[in-house]
Amino acid sequence: MVAGFVISSAVLIFIVLKFLDNDKESGSGESTNAEAASYEQFDIDKDKREVLKGRNTPAWFGTNVQFYFRSIWSIVWADKIHSLTFFVTVFVLGIGTTLVEGLVFLFWTDDLGASNFLCGVSVLVTVSFEIPLFYYSEHLLNRFDEHVLLVLSGVCYVVRVVCYTLFENAWWVLAVEPLHGVTFAFMQLASVHYTAKLAPPGLETSAQGLTGTVRSLGSITGTLAGGVIMQRLGSVFLYRGSATLVLVTISLHWLVGQCQSSSPLSSRAEVCPEELEKGGGGDLPAQPEGAVQGTLNLKAGPGPGFSASEDSEPNGEVNR
C-alpha cells in the first residue's frame, strides 16, 4: 500500500512538472499576457515585476506559481476564519467518510459477523436515501444555510458510527444506514454552494477543484491512518475516535460562524446598480464603452430567433 502511494505521488508530480514545462514553452505572447493579468489582479507594481522577471528561475516560477498560491489563498481566506474552518471541516469529513466507505465492511464482517449479502443491502439503503435528498436540494438550500447543512452532515456521521460500535447484531446497522445518505448529500450540497460563494470572479472552477482536492486529501489520510489504527487498536477505537474528531471539528466551525460578526461575502454581493454601470462596484471590471449591457434570457421569444430591443421588458429578448 505504501509503495503504491509513493508511485502514485511520483506520477502525479511528474505530470504537474511536465504541464508546467509545456506551459513555459507555449509561446512568449501568451505567457506575457498571462503574466500581465496575474500582476494586475494582485496589484503587483512595476518594480516588483522587474524583480520577479530578473530572478534566475523558470519563467513560471515567479509568476504562475505566485499566481496559483495567491489564488488559493484568496479562496481559503475569502470569508476570513470561517472559510478556513470550512476547509478544515471538509478535510476532516473526508477522513470520516472514507473510513466508512472503505473500511466499514471489514468491521462488520470481522467484528459483527455480517454477511456479504448484508453489506450489499446496506449500500442499496444508503443510495435510496441520497437520491431524494439531491432531488430536493433546492428546497433544502432555501430553508437551511450551507453551514447548517454541513453541521448536520457531521452530526449524522457521529450518530451513525457510534451506533456501529454499540450494535451486537449486524442487521441493526441497516437502521442507521440512511444517515449515510444524509451525511453525503448534505456535505456535497453545502460544499458546492458555499465554495461558489467563496470564489472570486474568474476562479469559480478553481475553487470547486480546491474543495475537491481538500476532500481527497482527507480520504487519502483516512485510508492510510485508518488501516493502521484498525489493525493495531481495533475497529471500535477507530470509529469512536473518528466520531470524536468530526464532532470537535464541526463544533469549532459552528462556533466560529457564530462569533464572526460580519462576513466579507455579504459586502462582495452588495453591489449597487449605479456602481455596476460605472464599472467601479465590487470585484467586477469596468465595462468598455459600447459594450452590450443587460442579460440574455434563453427562453425563446415569439419569433424564430432572438431580437434586440431598446426596452427592458422581460420578454425573453436581448436587452441593449
Image: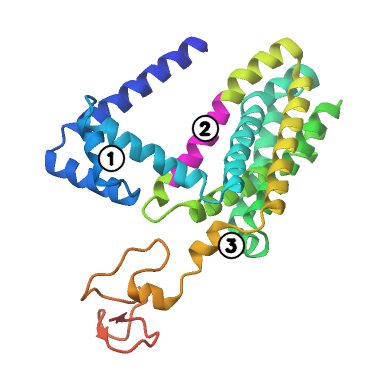
Q: Using the numbered discs, state the Cα–Cα distance from disc 3 to disc 1 in whole angstroms.
A: 46 Å
Which residue is nearer to you in this view: 265 or 206? 265
- Relative placement, left or right, of 222 versus 54 is right
Amino acid type assigned to the residue bearing label 3 in the image: Glu
Q: Position of residue 288 (x, y in %)?
A: 23, 70
Q: Residue 216 carries which label?
A: 2
Give the Cα distance between marks 1 and 2: 36 Å
At horizontal 78% and vertical 27% (from top left) the residue drawn is 240
Give the mark toward the camera: 1 or 2: 1
The alpha-carbon separation of the residues under discs 3 and 2 comes to 26 Å
The numbered mark, 3 or 1, whose residue comes first in the sequence reads 1
Three-letter code for the amino acid on which mark 1 is drawn = Lys
Nearest to viewer (mark 3 / mark 1)? 1
Q: In this view, does 298 lie above or below 28?
A: below
Q: Badge 1: few (under 14), some or many (20 or more) residues near its Cα, within 10 Å?
A: few
Which residue: 55% across, 63% down? 266
Q: Are marks 3 and 1 in contact (CB under 8 Å)?
A: no
Tell me residue 284's x, y (percent): 37, 63
State which tag comes first along the sequence, 3 or 2: 3
Instruction: Give, as a three-letter code, the residue at label 2.
Output: Ser
289 or 191: which is nearer to us?
Answer: 289
Q: Give the range drawn in magenta.
A: 207-220
- Quarter of the C terminus within the rendering: bottom left
Circle 3 — which element? helix
Name the quadrant containing residue 118: top right
Reading the image, the residue beneath label 1 is 48
Residue under numbered circle 3: 138
Helix, strand or loop for the magenta stretch, by majority: helix
